[in-house]
Amino acid sequence: MWKEENNTLTRTFEFKNFVDAFTFMTKIAFEAEKMNHHPNWSNVYNQVTISLNTHDAGNTVTDIDYKLADKIDKLFDGWGSKFKR
Amino acid sequence: MWKEENNTLTRTFEFKNFVDAFTFMTKIAFEAEKMNHHPNWSNVYNQVTISLNTHDAGNTVTDIDYKLADKIDKLFDGWGSKFKR
Amino acid sequence: MWKEENNTLTRTFEFKNFVDAFTFMTKIAFEAEKMNHHPNWSNVYNQVTISLNTHDAGNTVTDIDYKLADKIDKLFDGWGSKFKR
Amino acid sequence: MWKEENNTLTRTFEFKNFVDAFTFMTKIAFEAEKMNHHPNWSNVYNQVTISLNTHDAGNTVTDIDYKLADKIDKLFDGWGSKFKR
């Protein structure tokens, strides 16, 4: 689940392997670009950690962050969960 | 299902939308590149049609085509089926 | 260059290899999704053929097709030309 | 340039925008998967920071890290530099 701390929403997702993790990132990249709201995220092998806050609001968590977090959850539950360990 | 005709294996996949179709292509692209065996494929919106044969065998269907077809099916059944209409 | 024929704008691009071709497609995919105007395109190894027309205008070529064609050219001239043979 | 520190090779790349940064990551993802050697990397908007070391060698920098760093530089100089600010 997402954790809100230090003005940032953060969640880590785990997949079966690198390709599954990167494919998940590709799907989110389309979503983020369409919203013009981009995550601060990192990946190592099968793990993706996503951090969200709003630069234009002094790097605090705003509505658009909750909205993107919700979309990411839906993408993950929709198919990404298949790859969960 | 795959159809073998005119020395080519062909199957069409249907998704909910463009992003789901393109994400599926991304996953296959990694697989194809690792096998060094690349599809002849086309996409329009939510549809992806994949045709396979082996250039080095005079454009006939060979074992590596069945192998790639099988991997694509597994990728599709694994998560792509979620997006099937 | 783009060729207009049978109510369709078409152009073929050639790259050094499959990964370069697919990376170019990824960049166009973002653009197409943002415009909500999607190409009919095909790829085999290092070649990408893109066909454009407008479904909502009875599959004829309209302004949005010229606009997307222009964006694709800019993406290709911007970096894709590096991969031209 | 890459900096070697704390048993890690690190370099940050800057692009014009998010799509250019993510497209660059896609290209590297193919390379990393083929080498079966994956980066620890992060992205925020137009920036990509890549860290490399070898898990199987107690997280120290080994030959395969220099090899991947070299490939990434070639990919960046080949076309990514076009997007440099």
Image (cartoon, coloured by chain):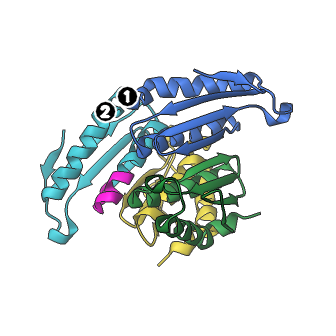
Chain colours: A cyan, B blue, C green, D yellow
- Hey, what amino acid is under mark 2? Gly
Tell which subunit mark 2 falls on: A
SS of the residue under disc 2: helix
Q: Can the viewer see residue D84 in this picture? A: yes
Give the residue at x 63% y 47%. C42
Marking on residue D74:
none
Tell which subunit mark 1 falls on: B
User: Residue D15 location in percent, x, y?
Assistant: 46, 70
Q: Nearer the viewer, residue C80 or D2?
A: C80
- Circle 1 Cα neighbour tier, 10 Å, few/some/many (<14 / 14–19 / ≥20): some
Find the residue positioned furthest to the bottom: D85
Give the residue at x 54% y 24%. B73
Q: Nearer the viewer, residue C81 or C57?
A: C57
User: Residue A48 location in percent, x, y?
Assistant: 35, 44
Residues at marks 2 and 1 touching, judged by CB atoms closer than 8 Å: yes
SS of the residue under disc 1: helix
Q: Do labels 2 and 1 share a chain?
A: no
Q: Which residues make up the magenta segment? A: A29-40
Position of B29 with respect to A3 (left or right) is right
Find the residue positioned furthest to the right: B58
Give the residue at x 75% y 31%. B53
Q: Mark 2 points at which residue?
A: A78
Work out how far the residue at label 2 is from the one at label 1, CA to CA, in angstroms. Answer: 7 Å
Q: Can the viewer see residue A7 in this picture? A: no
Q: Name the residue under label 1.
A: B82
- Hey, what amino acid is under mark 1? Lys
